[in-house]
Image (tube, rainbow, N blue to C red):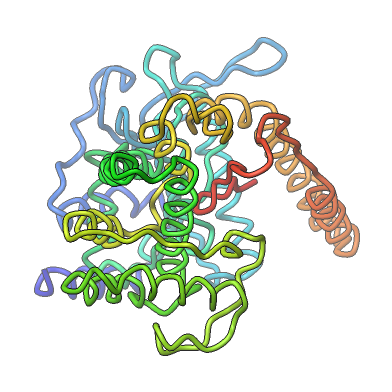
Amino acid sequence: MTDRLEPFLARWQNAGGTERANYQLFLTELCALLDLPLPEPAGDDTRDNAYVFERRVVIKQPDGSSNNGFIDLYKRGSFVLEAKQTGKTLDSSGWDKAMLRAHNQADQYARALPADEGRPPFILVVDVGRNIELYAEFSRSGATYTPFPDARSHRIRLEDLGKEPIRERLRAVWQDPLSLDPARRSARVTREIADQLAKLAKSLEAGGHSPQLVASFLMRTLFTMFAEDVGLLPARGFTELLQRLKAKPETFAPMLENLWQTMNSGGFSPILENTLLRFNGGLFADSQAISLDRDQMELLLSAAEADWRYVEPAIFGTLLERALDPRERHKLGAHYTPRAYVERLVLPTVIEPLRAEWQEVQVAALAFEARNKHKDAVAEVRAFHQHLCDVRVLDPACGKRYIPTFHHTPYMV
């Protein structure tokens, strides 16, 4: 890869001219660099092409008229790409505005695609020879395209192509975009872990432990795994503790109780040999642990080895649904609503209206900026920020303990 990457970077990092002169050549060479198929030759009507430069779309106007637009590069079922060659300093105000205009144009083109073709999951905005921005909307239902994977890392500089994970991400955008959907990845991982923990829970119940004790024990254990992987506990501290205790399971319960007592109060933990934060909320006020045998330890360790940053919080409900005595579920409030069902309601009723408001605020702020009214532009954005801070959402069915939280996939407006 290095022997091809370095000439590519040298060739394009100082490229001048306009995007019309350069973008097709740049994207063709990018595809070659990533070992991707090249766009098709255009037919008489590019609407018949599944992967083509200058794909025509018909844009309908509010007054009933229509005009043609042309997508710089289109791949059906994958992306709409809009290319610019801004010539502006990266990350400057002028550059941000140019990229935002390109994003809005790409979004308009995506929404102009025929309904039977569907909207692609990705929008790409390219500053030729310098930067690639990714935006995703995996439901393909007309919702807002948001920075992917997040607002801090959706911009790919040309030199970032030297990193294999970045190249793999772009290959997936071209060839299997839905594989990048974090909800699908989380659902798969969550199902696998839930199966393991359900076996453990049933084994503990069969050993005579009450469903309430099993549920509270597993809740604390699962949260400890999550806290480890998001940096609230020392990295791999809990997982390595389980590995050590696997050889002497009789010490598992007292050592885990000691750890949970420290997590409840905060302070130095001799178990993890580190100072811990205090975990409030009452989860660790009861520190009772259950003794496990070797097979049960293996199930717990297997779950701990997963990356809990990508595990759905719904696993708490999943585990309870699968593992507990059905007679006890109602008393525990152990019923949960799958994430997809929640999103089906939350996205159109809460998130999308806020995103639409944000787009209007952006237009207004840019209009103020164009008239050199910087203070008015800032005031417009700050007023919307305060509006977001004031939003309150009540879930009347969340019960008193198992509150649904989408911890690692915040809804970006």
Q: How many marks?
A: 0
Q: Which of these two is toward me, 393 or 252?
A: 252
| Residue 377: percent from left, percent from top | 84, 57
Q: Is residue 231 above or below residue 167?
A: below
The answer to whether residue 338 is left or right of residue 128 is right
Question: Which residue: 36% across, 32% down?
Answer: 322
Which quarter of the figure is the N terminus placed in? Answer: bottom left
At a point 52% along the width and 29% down the height, the residue shown is: 335
Which residue is at the far front? Answer: 208
Q: Is residue 354 visible?
A: yes
Q: Can the viewer see residue 193?
A: no
Observer-nearest of 347 and 250: 250
Q: Is residue 240 above or below residue 66?
A: below
Rendered location of residue 194, percent (x, y): 32, 42
On the image, which quarter does residue 402 sit in? top right
In screen coordinates, is 77 left or right of 107?
left
**297 or 290: which is nearer to us?**
290
Which residue occupies the foreground of this view, 327 or 50?
327
Q: Residue at x 31, y 70 (%)?
A: 252
Residue drawn 28% across the image and 55% down it: 303
Residue 358 point in image, percent of width and height: 73, 43
Give the quadrant of residue 63. Answer: top right
x and y, in percent, of residue 309 in the image: 41, 58
